[in-house]
Image (cartoon, rainbow, N blue to C red):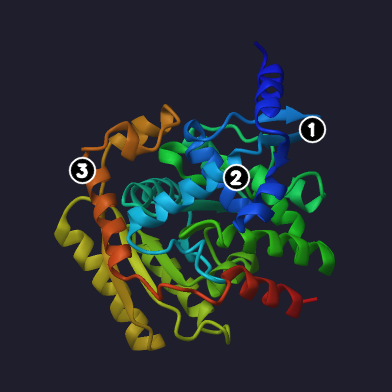
Amino acid sequence: MSREKNGMAMAGEHDRLLSIEEISRETGLEESVLRFYESEYGAELPDKILRGDVLSFPAVAVDAFRQLHARRTAASGATPKVAAAGSFARVIAVTSGKGGVGKTNLALSLAIELQRLGKLCLVLDADMGMANVHLLAGVNPSLSLMAVLNDQVAMADIIVEGPAGIGLIPGGSGLVALADSSRSERLKLVRALQQVELAAEIILVDTGAGMGAGVRDFLVAADDVLFVLTPDITSLADSYGLLKALHQERDFAGRPVYSVINMVHSLTEAADVAQRFADCARRFLGQEVENLGYIMKDATVGGATVRRTPYCIFRPQARVSVNTRNVARAILKREQPEIRLSSSFGRFLERLQGKL
């Protein structure tokens, strides 16, 4: 039996079909939350069907979504952030002063490890020049933020399910277009991103490398900034240069800054790089930089990249995967307020509007 016919049979049993928008009104849950549940727990929900070009569920799905949400709430021991009144996700910008430091690979595997530790995690690919998170994740999105900007689809429709159930938001050309878009277009897109903030607990923003204005906007707006460095002296110099540029932004004061030292050969080497970066930041900028850990240089990363598989899934017991897991735990130990009333993407929007 075809999917459509099967859906019609179900509709007959349960009165009528409801769109995600209608289910959102019935349950009080954000549409983006429902989309995330649909993606991650589809096997536990009534089969969805296609009604014209609108994805719909039988009416019984209202209770299924409610039960699923209640179960997740009970399992976590507290109300999930998406259910807390006006609570936004913790947004962590992952950045570097230069390319070639393994930033994107690390951001992807870090998101997976955070998801495995019980956090609803999304990755926003905000690298305007080399948006390639989807390639490393082994997925092929057909839409990006450009489709949202052009009113073709809703934000929830472009979120792609990645490995281990993480969500991926392809940015790329949509973010490039955002730089030259009108005020109304910017408002529309950033408001859509704010809805995503209500659907996740942690959003990792994989920024472009370097000191471009677009990079700085994301870094200043984020709740936390995570620098990825390597033992290469140019990595240290360029990361310090980026941090110095951020300190010239009036809105950056007080932002927590962390470091992870990647591609190291020993713990001693990692500690030396972390200490030098922290000392420079403290001495010349008055900025504290806390090191969250290190990632050993490992051939596992290259093998995983060739196979378009995140390294923490390719070889979960490899040194690089264990190191990444430790960094994820360190991030969670530095949790910020349980309920966030401030939207990072709202701050991003304010910066964009201030430049018009």
Mark 2 and mark 1 lie on one chain; the one further toward the N terminus is: 1
**Does the CB distance between marks 3 and 2 fall below 8 Å?**
no
At mark 1, the secondary structure is: loop
Residue at mark 2: 62
Residue at mark 3: 319
Q: Residues within 10 Å of mark 1 (few under 14, many from 20)?
A: few
Q: Quadrant of the C terminus?
A: bottom right
Residue 179 x %, y %: 74, 62
Label 1 and label 3: CA atoms lie apart by: 46 Å
Residue 132 x %, y %: 55, 42
> Left of 308 or right of it: where is 352?
right
Q: Is residue 279 visible?
A: yes
Q: Nearer the viewer, residue 45 or 323?
A: 45
Mark 1 and mark 3 lie on one chain; the one further toward the N terminus is: 1
Q: Is residue 97 visible?
A: no
- Label 1 or label 3, whichever lies nearer to me, is 1
Note whether 338 is above or below 18 in the view shown: below
**Does the CB distance between marks 2 and 1 fall below 8 Å?**
no
Q: Quadrant of residue 220?
A: bottom right
Q: Residues within 10 Å of mark 3 (few under 14, many from 20)?
A: some
At mark 2, the secondary structure is: helix
> Left of 107 or right of it: where is 315?
left
Residue at mark 1: 53
Which residue appears at 19% of the width and 60% of the height?
269
